[in-house]
Image (spheres, rainbow, N blue to C red):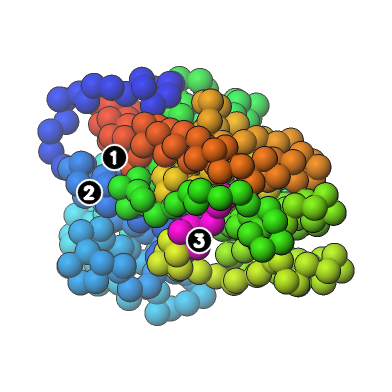
Amino acid sequence: MGGTEGAAAHEPSAVARRVRLASIVNRYPSPSETFIERKARALTEAGFDVTIAAHQVGPAPGGADDPVASLQLPIVRRPSTWWGTARLLAGDAPARRRVRAVGAELRHDHGLVPIVAGAFDIVHFEFSGIAASMVDSLEHLRPARLSVSCRGTAERITPHRDPERADRLARVFDTVDLVHCVSLEMAEVVAAYGAPEEKVLVNRPAVDTGRWAGVGRVDDGERGTADRPLRVLSVARLHWTKGFDDAVRAVAAARRAGFHIRYRIAGDGPERDKLLYLRHSLGLEAEIELLGWQDQADVEAHLGWADAFVLSSLSEGISNSALEAMAAGVPVVSTRCGGMAEVLSAPDAGLLVDVGDVGQLAEALHSLGDPARRSALAAGATAVARADFDLARQAQVFATAYRELLATEGPS
C-alpha cells in the first residue's frame, strides 16, 4: 500500500458495492475538526456508506437528511449512552451473534461494541491516539480492515509526556492494515515507530477550494504605514504548539523597525491569558485583537479583510486553516513545521521561516508591504491549493486506497 497521493491513480473494479466505513473520533461534530465531516461527505459522494462513531455525539450537521450517519459509542459510566447500542442489538440477531463471539474480549473497550455489531468493511481511526488507547482490542474488530490517521500531536508530542504511547503506537502500526500520514515528514515520524513502509499512505489534508475561491483580495497600495497597516490573520486553537507568542513578538519587532501591523487571532484555548498578558506587556493592545472562537462565516469575513495569513506553529501536521487561506488567495507565511514545508515548496506558494525565529517572521511580514509581492503570492497560493489540496482529489485517493484494501486478502 505504501505510496503518496499519486500512487492511487486507478480505482480497482474488484469491489463495486458501496463500502461500509466507520470513522472513529472522540467527538462529532467538533468545531475544530470540520475536516472529518468534509472527508465523510466526499467519500459518501464517492460511493461509500460512512458512519462517524464517537463517544460524544451531537445533532447531525446536515439535519435529519444528513447522508453521513453518526453512531454513539457507549461509555461505561454513562448509562444513557448505552440505549442506542441496546436498541441496535435488540433488533439485529446477526449483530448480537457478532458481539457474543468477542464480547469477553471487549471487557476493557466496551465502546467498540457498536463497531463490532455494525459489521463494517473498514474501521478508520481518525487519530492514532484513539487507536493507541484501544490497541489491545483492535484485532477483535476483524474481519474489518483497519486503518489509522497520523496527524501530528499524537505522534510527536504525546510520547514525550506518556512513556507508554510510543510502544502503543508501534503496536497499532503493526496491527492495522493502512497507516495514513498527512505528509512525507509524518511518514518519516511513523517509520521511527516501526510502521512498515508498505502500509503507509501519504494523503495530504484538503479543503473545498471552490468554497473559498475569491474570498481574499489584494489591494493595490503599499501596506505597513501607521494609517495603512498590514492586516494579518491567524486561525488556530490557542495552544502552545501554535507558537502565537512568537507571532506577537514579531508584530512588536516589526513596529520597532517602523513597519505597522494589525493582527487578528481567531481561536480560543489555554494560552489565551498568556497572550493577553504578552500583548499588554509589549504595548500592543491597539495592534492585536484576540477574537475568540469564530465560525466558518466569521473566518471567511476575516480572510476577506486580511492581507496575509500567519502560521507560527512549533509543531504541526498540515494546517487546514492555512490551506483555506491559500484557497482564498491570501498570502501565507509559515514556519517550517511538520508538513508545511511541503505545502509551500513551490515558487510563490508562500513564505517559510524557521521555527521560533521572530526576526525572520517579522522580515517576512515586512516584505508583504509590497502589493506586487502580495499579488504574486496570492496567485501562487491559489494555484497550489487547487492543484494539490482540493477535497475531491483527497477523497479519491482515500476511496482508491480503501477499495484496494478490500481487494486484497486480510489477516485471518
Quarter of the image with the N terminus in it? top left
Pointer 3 local density, CA inside 10 Å: few below 14, some 14–19, many at least 20: some
User: Could you tell me how far apart the alpha carbons at marks 3 and 1 are, in whole angstroms?
Assistant: 27 Å
The percent position of residue 37, horizontal first and vertical second, equals: 35, 56
The percent position of residue 33, horizontal first and vertical second, equals: 46, 57
| Upstream in sequence: badge 3 or badge 1 | 3
Pointer 2 local density, CA inside 10 Å: few below 14, some 14–19, many at least 20: many
Q: Regarding mark 3 in the picture, which secondary structure is present there?
A: helix
Residue 305 in magenta stretch: yes
Residue 385 in magenta stretch: no
Q: Which residue is at the front of the view, 52 or 385?
A: 385
- Residue shown at 36%/20% (left/top)? 7
| Upstream in sequence: badge 2 or badge 1 | 2
User: Could you tell me how far apart the alpha carbons at marks 3 and 2 are, in whole angstroms?
Assistant: 34 Å
Q: Which residue is mark 2?
A: 44
54 above or below 349?
below
Viewer-nearest of discs 3 and 2: 3
- Residue shown at 44%/28% (left/top)? 201
Hey, which residue is sitting farthest left in the picture?
A: 16
Q: Regarding mark 1 in the picture, which secondary structure is present there?
A: helix
Bounds of the magenta segment: 302-308
* Circle 3: residue type: Trp
For residue 43, side relative to residue 366 (left or right):
left
For residue 348, side relative to residue 277 (left or right):
left
